Image (cartoon, grey):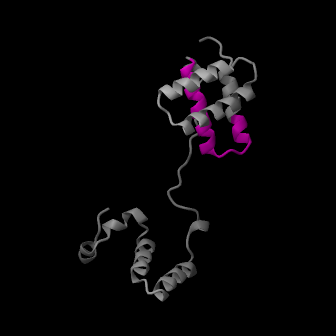
């Protein structure tokens, strides 16, 4: 396709296509919402790569979270593929994943000790030991199942 003007008919065809692809109703509604917002931004002008990039920059300047912008871009790119305009697809924003949580989310020593005291005062020895294990090792809750009596006796656990 040489020129793309986003019309209601094309959006309706895309909706039907998504249904045939067995996308969930929530996914379809999300795509429709994203495409209609882009259509409103584009107006009746021909969609160009420059326009799509400007839209992405507009989303970022409106302080959308990077994940939200990338989700909207995915919807629009899917639509571009559907209408045969692969050349209009734009790149998502690279997102640096945080390995560690921010210091504000970390427990202070006082908070940690209060948690242990609360577990102990309720007579919940298992919770007390669980908290000590998680906080002492940094493991995830889902990894607790690897801390067994045998692992403690060996002095090591394999996750």
Please tell me which residue is depicted at 43% across the width and 71% down the height of the picture.
Answer: 134
Farthest residue in the top direction?
2
Q: Quadrant of residue 75?
A: top right
Query: Which stretch is magenta?
Result: 57-83
Q: Position of residue 57 (x, y in %)?
A: 70, 35
Q: Quadrant of the N terminus?
A: top right
Residue 102 falls within the magenta-colored stretch = no
Please tell me which residue is depicted at 50% across the width and 56% down the height of the picture.
Answer: 99
Please tell me which residue is depicted at 29% across the width and 64% down the height of the picture.
Answer: 158
Q: Is residue 48 visible?
A: no
Of the pair 21 and 48, the residue shown nearer to us: 21
Q: Is residue 4 visible?
A: yes
Of the pair 41 and 12, the residue shown nearer to us: 12
Please tell me which residue is depicted at 26% across the width and 72% down the height of the picture.
Answer: 151
Q: Quadrant of residue 155?
A: bottom left
Q: Position of residue 115 (x, y in %)?
A: 52, 80
Q: Quadrant of the C terminus?
A: bottom left
Residue 71 falls within the magenta-colored stretch = yes
Dominant secondary-structure state across the stretch colored magenta? helix
Query: In the displayed structure, would residue 103 be above or below residue 20?
Result: below
**Relative to 133, is 54 on the left or the right?**
right
How many numbered badges does the structure rendering display?
Answer: 0
Q: Position of residue 95 (x, y in %)?
A: 56, 45
Q: Position of residue 66 (x, y in %)?
A: 62, 44
**Relative to 157, is 112 on the left or the right?**
right
């Amino acid at each position: 396709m040489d020129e793309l003007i986003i019309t209601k008919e094309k959006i309706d065809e895309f909706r039907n296509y998504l249904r045939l692809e067995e996308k969930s109703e929530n996914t379809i509604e999300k795509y429709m919402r994203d495409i209609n917002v882009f259509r409103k931004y584009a107006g009746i002008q021909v969609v160009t790569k420059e326009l799509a990039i400007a839209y992405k920059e507009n989303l970022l300047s409106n302080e959308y979270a990077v994940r939200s912008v990338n989700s909207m871009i995915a919807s629009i790119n899917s639509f571009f593929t559907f209408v045969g305009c692969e050349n209009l697809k734009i790149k998502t924003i690279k997102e640096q994943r945080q390995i560690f949580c921010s210091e504000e989310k970390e427990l202070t020593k006082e908070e940690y000790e209060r948690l242990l005291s609360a577990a102990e005062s309720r007579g919940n020895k298992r919770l007390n030991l669980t908290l000590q294990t998680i906080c002492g090792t940094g493991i995830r809750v889902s990894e607790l199942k690897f801390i067994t009596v045998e692992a403690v006796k060996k002095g090591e656990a394999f996750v």
